[in-house]
Amino acid sequence: MSEMEEIVGSPFLNKLSGPESRFEPLNSGNLRSDGRRPLELRSFEAELTTHPSADGSASVSHGLTQVTACVYGPREAKNRGLTMHDRALVNVEVSVAPWAGEMRRLRSRGDKRTLEFAASIKSTFEPVIQTTLYARSEIDIHIHVLQLDGGLLQASINATTLALVDAGVPMLDYVSSLSAGLYHTTAMLDLTSVEESDLPSVTVAVLPRSGKVTLVSMETRLHVDRFEEMFKLAMEGGKVLRGEMDRVVRERTAALARQMEGGVALKEDDKMDTDL
Amino acid sequence: MVEITIRKRPAEEELHAQRKFFRKTRRGRVIKVLRERYLRTDIGCGVAHCTLCSHLPAPDQQPALPRTGTPHAHFPAGHHLLPDTNAFLHQMDLFEHPDFAASVIVLQTVVEEVRHRSLPLWNRLKNLVRNGGEQGAEGAGGAWVFWNEFREETAVVREEGEGPNDLNDRAIRNAASWYNAHVASSFPARASVRAPTVVLLTDDAASLSLASKAQIPAMSVRAYVAGLPHAQDLGDVLAAYASTSRGEAEEGQGAGQSGRGRGGGRKALYDEYWPAGTVEAGVKSGRLFQGFFNPSQYNYLEGFVNSQALGRPILVIGRADLNRAVSGDIVAVELYPESQWKAPGDEVVDQEQTLANDDASGSEDEAAETERRVALRELRDARDTARRHPLERHPTGRVVGVVKRNWRAYVCHLDAASLASSARTAQAQQTVFATPVAANLPRIRLRTRQAPQLVGQKIVVSIDRWDVTSRYPEGHFVRALGKAESKEAEQESLLLEYEVPYRAFGRAILDCLPKEGEDWVVPPKEAGSVVWRDREDLRDTIICSIDPPGCQDIDDALHAFPLPNGNIQAGVHIADVSHFVLPENAMDSEAAARGTTVYLVDKRIDMLPSLLGTNLCSLRPFVERLAFSVIWELTPDAKIVNVRFTKSVIASKAAFTYKEAQTRKDDLKQKDPLTESIRLLNSLAQKLRAGRMAAGALNLASPEVRIQMESPESSDPIDVEQKELLETNSLVEEFMLLANISVAAKIQETFPQTAVLRRHMPPPASNFEMLQDVLMKRKSMSLDISSSGALAASLDKCVDSAEPSFNILVRIMATRCMRPAEYFCAGSVSRETFGHYGLASPIYTHFTSPIRRYADVLVHRQLAAAIDYTPLHASLHSRQHMERILNVVNRRHRMAQMASRASIEFYVALSLKGRAEREGGGVREKAFIIRAFRNGVAVFVSKLGLEGLVTFKREISFDPEVYSVKVPSPTGEQVALSVFDEVDVEISVEKDVNTQRGKVKMVLVHPIDSRSL
């Protein structure tokens, strides 16, 4: 359970949320503890092809949370026993850097919390990736958490989406994910780790075009009446994020196209690999 | 759909946007804390009609500062005031003064620092800002919180080697300089009106000089106040802090300012407090004990610290060991070895007598001499009082540190003797003593110019500090309440002393009331009506209410009629307050903060605006009212067949007083359905009561008296009488209990985590030790406290045929051994501890008085949700939130009880005075001795519900074994006075010459006249 507290922060365990807690998630000026308004997302930045050795890779940061995802495949399965004759196998591995969290610590590969986390990402993407196109092969997704400040699941999912796009794996749509929390009756989006430990929160992953939801993850308790509002806002926020991700992908593609056309017309500040 | 945006952060902002620091945990591990911050440009300056900020989004906040500022002698163009943290921490009374009318800018940096340093002051600051917002709208003063740390221009980043205090000071200066530029540029350059100045208010010398270097207008508090209108009055309110630099002021909190500051070379009278770190470590390791400090009621040189860790109160004796602890402080205590443990004193030591000739300015040799004499005497007193048989020894210790001061404003009288005789009339500033009304507080030394005018008035005084070199704490004058013994001053002082919020309801709160006001009526019944949805129509049911005479807030009504199957339907209808008071609006938060309506003898301080309390929610007869009904089917033996809960509309058919209902019931000629239903209810109530008593409910007594007024207008009490209890009182009570118990079971079942319940813990056996011992030794009676039933039975046996009121006395004393009942959240404690000891019910709550108790409002909401009438509001799902609310409500409830008791005491004293004047001389009453001391006895006058002390000046012999004193009578023989003896006392009200404080004085007249002793 201690991992749980550290990674996502559960209000059952957290000492901060007691009546003595002096943390004010939303002050009287309608500002959150980091100066955002309730419905503002943290600064979102994404970069494609950060690891040229992988088939596709992306690095995503939501505020101070930074996650890199690498996609290998579709390729021949290493473990023949697990291959499926009609579709591809999706493997997800998550590793958290020792320096990512508040305290320096090394996580073992068998860490329960990390495994659970990998499983939820896997089940998020399995229905979205068109696995039937790649029978008897496997797609490996490696996620590296570099820095943690809340919203780990959303950052991992968004990074994976972009890495898959970068790898050219066919998907039904972008999967964009966002966390939402509730303070009294005000819903807030994109929680930091302080907020996560103090507020009930939900993480939602949506396919923005169809409005389908592939993941809803909630580890805190919340009254069902309040859930709908939070849930809807998280979905709306997901659509905003999709626009942002789409823009990044288009820019990257445009740059690539320019390189292929002009060959030498490479702009100085486009520090990209031309060997793709 | 609302707009969702991504807050983009430019790369160059990276540095400003992050804060990184390392923190060491208690276990010695290092935690890296990394926080980011988004700087904005859309944070308003709060000045009305500011040309630069008018376009900014301000969610439900109107700019609160007047455009041209407020007047000040030094700033002809007007000014806005920007105080630093210490200004608020030390001089909050100045900002709260009604004559203080400057427009105040409160920086976020300051708010957070205040919150970090003192939560009560932070709450006052919040109130100040809230009221300031309302004021500003009307053109005067006003206050505005500026979120400087989120505004691009004013945010600061920590520099290398800069401490947190320096950083905050720099942030404050930065904001001040930005504000000046901002305000100036919002005025057109050639305009006829000049822009007001923004003045930085700080007492920190370093900050002042840095500000002047940066050309920021800055002033110290005293210099600033001197230039204000009403400077004379405001000057007195200033706290006694000298202009100190920041570091020093902080040190004063922890380690004390040894010999420095204004104490000069004076001798330290007290030990220094241990450093905060040492105290904390000591408490953690179990070497020190931490707890609230409670001074003894009878001896000002003695007190107890209730330590959770030790499980027993720790005795602290003597001025040096008490070490400047004030009632309510959380202190850390070091225990003495067991051989030095002592017993609580058995002597009455009165501060005023002991220290009568102390001098306030206290620096002359003469005063030092007095102090030495006093110290010697005190030492002897403390030692003597502790010499007692060893069985009753308590863990004894001394205060070594104060974890948290809980100083508040105290109502005081000025000690006329402490005024310099030469300056009795002069306007010169002089040092005087103020004696708090509450007896167990030290007197406070304060400096004022108004001393001569303040003599004979009730005044409010705050404590600022208490140095080791000073025998008394130092404070400052806050405001005057009015002439002592005038009813208004006494009333207000009561409210202040018990921290009862009594401000009039603000506009935001009144806006939550129905628009129709007095004319609001239940809308006609028709399909689709919101009010009528899921409401039962009980308008034709014969319902009546029974209340004390003159009751305006009728919150309960009853009905009963026989059913065809031989059973009886009975119903309790409670005003549907939750229909009007919606969760989380201004009215709701105010009611939650007030917690309860407070009843004083001549005034009621409402929890809800009176439109609701006495009209819309009052179940008056012949009008349709919304109600929440509990309806039972009972067998003729009062066994519950079933119960249901419903929102309803009722029209009461009559509002009786207890007496009227009783007469009507007893009049056998009356056969109308209303009377029949009262009879039916009464027969059921008797069976319910019998059942409850059989289950072991306690019948406890408290000295309840009623003040008889001559006429409602004059409000001069003429007599005091004990409350009369009629059958109908018990009728109403039984049905309310039944309703509460039924509702409690229902909400606990539906909301096992958050249900609001009330419990009464069984008292610990140790509470009864003394009473049992006295009863055994004096009367050979015993109390069986193994269960509430056993206690009830043994109380019934404590009867002395010669003294009929003896049984009541024992009940009163037993009541004092009980723990108070409390509200709690069902999920917070284990199921086994839900029980209500006094009522012998396994579960209980308060449902029946939502007009005057906030817990009932919460219960109403939960019950409405439990029957699927409305969904439960989100805040009522959070246990932590509920616990917070209930803590406040519990505290308010306790305070309200004490306030009304004190109010009754005041009127009892008034009526005694009147009686004494009419009858000539003192008032003679019968009294019981309830406690014996080495130099006196405590007596209780049951007829007046009054407790008093009779002290003997002459040496008497005291035998603690048998709780008795032997007093020599004039004829030479010894007269024994023992606990439970009945005596005659003469009661008079006497004014203290110096403080003008009225004091009830009792002397024995029978069996012995104590006046000669």
Image (spheres, coloured by chain):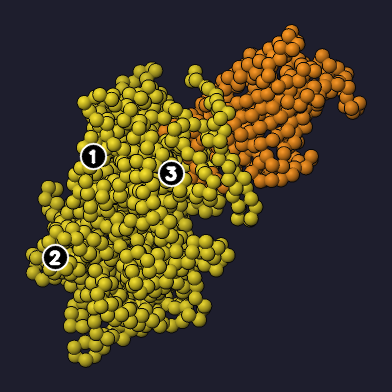
Chain colours: A orange, B yellow
Tell me, yes or no, whether dots 2 and 1 are on the same chain: yes
All told, the count of numbered labels is 3
Residue under numbered circle 2? B423
CA gap between label 3 and label 1 equals 24 Å
Residue B645 lies in what quarter of the image?
top left
Residue at coordinates 33% horizontally, 69% vertically from top-left?
B264
Tell me, yes or no, whether dots 3 and 1 are on the same chain: yes
Circle 3 residues within 10 Å: few <14, some 14–19, many ≥20: some
Seen from this angle, which residue lies furthest front? B213
Residue B259 seen: yes
CA gap between label 3 and label 2 equals 45 Å
CA gap between label 2 and label 1 equals 35 Å
Left or right relative to B799: residue B339: right
- Front residue of this view, candidates B155 and B884: B155
Q: Secondary structure at mark 1?
A: strand
The numbered mark, 3 or 2, whose residue comes first in the sequence reads 3
Relative to B139, does residue B455 appear above or below in the rendering?
A: below
Residue under numbered circle 1? B75
- The percent coordinates of residue A276 (x first, y second) are 79, 17
Relative to B24, does residue B520 appear above or below in the rendering?
A: above
Q: Chain of mark 2?
A: B
Circle 2 residues within 10 Å: few <14, some 14–19, many ≥20: few
Name the amino acid, label 2: Ala
The numbered mark, 2 or 1, whose residue comes first in the sequence reads 1
Name the amino acid, label 1: Phe
Residue under numbered circle 3? B170
